[in-house]
Image: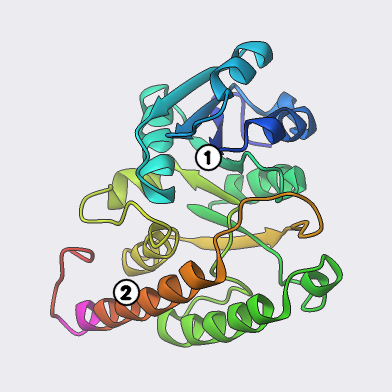
Amino acid sequence: MPSNTSKVIGIIMTYNCAHLVEGIYNRLPKNVFDSIFITDDGSKDDIQKVAYTLGIECLKHEHTGYGGNIKLGLAKALEMGAEYMVEIHGDGQFSPEFIVPGLEKMKSGYDFILGSRFTDIRQPLRDKMPVPRYLANISLSFIDRLVLGLRLTEFHNGARIYSRRLIETIGFKNTSNDYLYSFEIIAQARYHNLKVGEVSERADYGKDHTSISMKKSIVYALKTFGVLGKYVLARIGFKTKLFR
């Protein structure tokens, strides 16, 4: 575990999944957190009522997308003095079991931890991940490994732990407010030579969840190639707004 002086804050991200939030909240290892709050991306449901019932704060804002939602949560957590910030998806698709080993790994000197579904290459299929999504993830992650030089089994996930050093080093300027931010921050961390690692994670595709559609996934995948291109240009001396 992080030391007693290292504040850990959990950020539960929601978008029209209020009916699922209590389930994931009850599964969290609350003893490792100093505080937990919700960031809601313009939902039309009763998330504020759920937050009141759970006794936690809900930061509700106009719909911006995944990137806008998590950046709001990270900025708030930094203001609260967080050293480590845990991203928790409110639909409960991702198991919270990555949190404890992830925090332990952060304590050993990592700046950014990703929860990977692919440390066991067959596990995502056993968890009912659709085959097209499975194959796309493997293919994209293979390309990402080659370009970024990071030895990760997965780059496109939703279970993460951020350090204060990571956010203070790269900031939020010129990043996307949609799901592309999830990949931009990995590439930025690599560009700044920050330490990125992973722990095993599970995701349940057999129950109600809020994964992005295949159409949006294809658009996202194409945009990641643009990020990789900018990364390569920055490495050879042609700076861009994303990599400075």
Q: Is residue 236 magenta?
A: yes
* Magenta highlight: main SS: helix
On-image quarter of the C terminus: bottom left
Q: Find residue 50 and report its image quarter.
A: top right
Which SS class for mark 1?
A: loop
The circle on residue 227 is: 2
Q: Residue at x 61, y 41 (%)?
A: 88
Callouts 1 and 2 close, C-beta under 8 Å: no
Residue 15: mark: 1
Answer few, some or many: residues within 10 Å of disc 2's Cα (few below 14, many 20 plus, some between 14 and 19). some
* Res 181 → quadrant: bottom left
Measure the alpha-carbon separation of dots 1 and 2: 26 Å
- Work out whether mark 1 precedes mark 2 in sequence or the reverse, and give the earlier one: 1
Q: Is residue 231 left or right of residue 131?
A: left
Specify start and end residues of the magenta stretch as a single range: 233-237
**Where's residue 115, x and y in %?**
65, 57
Q: Amino acid at mark 2?
A: Val
Please determine whether, in this image, residue 157 is positioned above or below residue 138.
above
The residue most toward the front is 44
Q: Residue at x 60, y 57 (%)?
A: 211
Dot 2: element: helix
Q: In the rendered image of this protein, does residue 234 appear above or below residue 181?
A: below
Is 217 within the magenta?
Answer: no
Residue type at numbered disc 1 = Tyr
Count numbered badges in the picture: 2
Could you tell me which quadrant the N terminus lies in? top right
